[in-house]
Amino acid sequence: MIPRILKIQHNHSFFLFGPRGVGKTTLLEALLPKERTFTLDLLEYETLLRLQRRPQEFAEIIAALPDRVEWVFIDEVQKFPPLLDEVHRQIERNPHRQFALTGSSARKLKRGQANLLAGRAFTLALFPFTSVELGARFDLDHALQFGTLPKVHALATEDEKNMFLRSYTHTYLQEEIRNEGLVRNLAGFHRFAPIAGSENGNILSWSNFAQDTGVSMKTARGYFEILEDTLLGFFLPAYHRSLRKRQRTHPKFYFFDPGVKRALAQELTQPLIAGTPQYGRAFEHFWIAEIMRLARYRQNDWRFSYLATHDIEIDLLVERPGMPLLFVEIKSAETVRGQTLTPLRTLVEEIAESEGICISREPRARKIHPRVSIVPWQEALTALTLQ
């Protein structure tokens, strides 16, 4: 098993959220003591059906557990949110027994106004493998082409990886969207998904999406919120601190994994070739997601946004408590031309407490301004204090 960065507290209950297939169950089975853990898998149809028919059976099961059981592991808790009321009661009654609760969708819990335990359980998140976790096994071009879901790394051939990613997105559309009844217009959502994949990382235009998918702007916006709530992606907001230039207000949206994005956009058969716009967009996508997930693991309390005015666009802004504002440009070139970083230099000169970094494929780091550096991607996370 590839070691994960995420650590759990062994004396406190927690939620562990993450998209399907990132390894939540595998991780907890490895970390929780087997002989002192009781597991309830809500993906097992018979188990789920019994509890739906007679919810009080859960309390009876817990009451019958021997004293040696310290952990109750409930997998995919969003399948039956009413269990959380009893989990709350059990935590109050027996502080010596902890609950580990996994979920691949926060939307059903929110929609059902589920009991989220009012701080009695920590909230953790698990993502696909990071470059740090993969270490020497990390291959940048492979990550851009297929993503870093654990199953992708277990498959031997490109055909197998492509088949898995297509199945993954099909399963998502079938099980998370249709079976859970998250949208009324399923045909509209099916039209929307590949368009959203193709527009990954672009500034969102609700009206354009509505026109392309044949739904209202409100519905198009709601579809993106479904993607976010089912953990398939995240919004990157526009930077709102007062600067000289007026900011755009529409967010960007990124899928959580480049391979899943390529599958949704129906791009898996198109090779990624260095130097092409497609490669550049994939490079930017990967590093934005990588920085954000590592910051989440480190619990850095960093805030992320992008900046776009009529004359300046910056891929990523990072607000770091007690540290200078960080401007990040992401360029896949092996030689970054100085004029392409003029906006970066302009901003750090305008804002005293700021610095800039350009993540690239250059072979060596170089400094082009006292507070602006170009770094090879292999050194980027160290430069960002994330490794």
Image: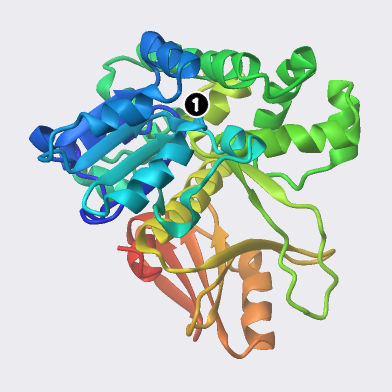
Q: Quadrant of the C terminus?
A: bottom left
Above or below: residue 59 compared with residue 277: above
Q: Quadrant of the N terminus?
A: top left
Residue topped by disc 1? 80
Q: What residue do we see at 78% from left, 79% from top?
A: 242
Left or right of 266 on screen, residue 359? left
- The residue lying toward the viewer, choosing from 231 and 293, is 231
- Could you tell me residue 373's position as x and y percent? 47, 73
Residue 109 seen by the camera: yes
Above or below: residue 43 compared with residue 15: above
- Could you tell me residue 361's position as x and y percent? 43, 53
Residue 273 seen by the camera: no
Image quarter of residue 40: top left
Q: What residue do we see at 68% from left, 24% from top?
A: 182
Crowding around mark 1 (Cα neighbors within 10 Å: few <14, some 14 to 19, many 20+) is some
- The residue lying toward the viewer, choosing from 230 and 155, is 230
Q: What residue do we see at 61% from left, 36% from top?
A: 107
Image quarter of residue 136: top left
- The secondary structure type at the circle numbered 1 is loop
Inspect the image, locate mark 1, and give the three-letter code of the amino acid beneath it.
Phe
Above or below: residue 6 compared with residue 25: below
- Could you tell me residue 43's position as x and y percent? 40, 18
- The residue lying toward the viewer, choosing from 253 and 49, is 49
Left or right of 275 on screen, residue 41? left
